[in-house]
Image (cartoon, grey):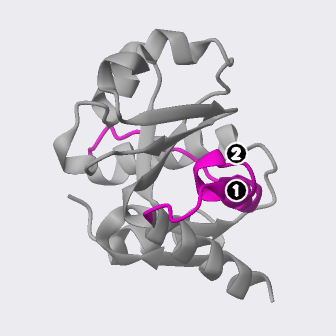
């Protein structure tokens, strides 16, 4: 485990500005002149290994990615949807719409999932702790790196992002 304060210091030493962490979750905001999110993620991954000795996946999520979680998620359009059962898996690469077939989602009914670019919107019937449709399953089936966040976290991250740029 890497303490968020140590991670923040490392990122600032790398030259990132506006570094801000969100709880002990691995969520960190950085400002960078680099526009390629993958390049930013790769640099951070290398530095984490160099400084802390941990080979950890890094997925860069942009403001646009966070906004799309609210505009593109079909589950949010359902009446009386339980936000506590909605999650987003952020994926390390763009997925084709046919990738949903590789997930074999029908075996997880009544859980549901929809692919949207580099995001998978998930609606759990009972909850995230009671399903096999989790991050490890997604990573294995699609051969990707993924990180999952619930909608409360996604909401908070977007709120923090908007506060940073105002």
**Per the image, is 44 magenta?**
no
CB-based contact (under 8 Å), mark 1 and mark 2: yes
> Is residue 128 rendered to the left or right of residue 120?
left
Return the residue at label 1: 62
Q: Which quadrant of the figure contains the C terminus?
A: bottom right
State left or right for residue 74 relative to residue 166.
left
**Which region of the structure is painted magenta?**
53-82
Query: Is residue 86 something one can see in this rendering?
Result: yes
Residue located at (68% from left, 27% from top): 94
The one nearer the camera, 62 or 20, is 62
Q: Which residue is labeled 2 in the image? A: 37
Q: Nearer the viewer, mark 1 or mark 2?
A: 1
Q: How far apart are marks 1 and 2 (CA)?
A: 8 Å
Q: Name the one closer to the observer, 61 or 75.
A: 75
Image quadrant of residue 106?
top left
Task: Examine the rendering and report whether any part of residue 10 can be seen.
Answer: no
């Amino acid at each position: 485990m890497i303490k968020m304060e140590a991670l923040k210091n490392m990122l600032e030493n790398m030259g990132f500005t506006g570094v801000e962490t969100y709880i002990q979750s691995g969520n960190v905001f950085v400002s960078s002149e680099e526009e390629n999110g993958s390049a930013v993620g790769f640099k951070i991954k290398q530095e984490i290994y160099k400084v802390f000795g941990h080979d950890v996946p890094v997925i860069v999520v942009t403001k646009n990615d966070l906004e799309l979680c609210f505009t593109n998620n079909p589950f949010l359009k359902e009446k009386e949807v339980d936000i506590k059962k909605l999650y987003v898996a952020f994926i390390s690469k763009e997925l084709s719409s046919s990738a949903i077939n590789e997930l074999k989602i029908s075996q997880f009914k009544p859980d549901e999932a929809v692919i949207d670019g580099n995001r998978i919107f998930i609606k759990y019937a009972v909850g995230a702790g009671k399903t096999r449709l989790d991050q490890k399953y997604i990573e294995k089936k699609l051969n990707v790196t993924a990180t999952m966040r619930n909608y409360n976290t996604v909401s908070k991250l977007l709120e923090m992002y908007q506060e940073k740029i105002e």
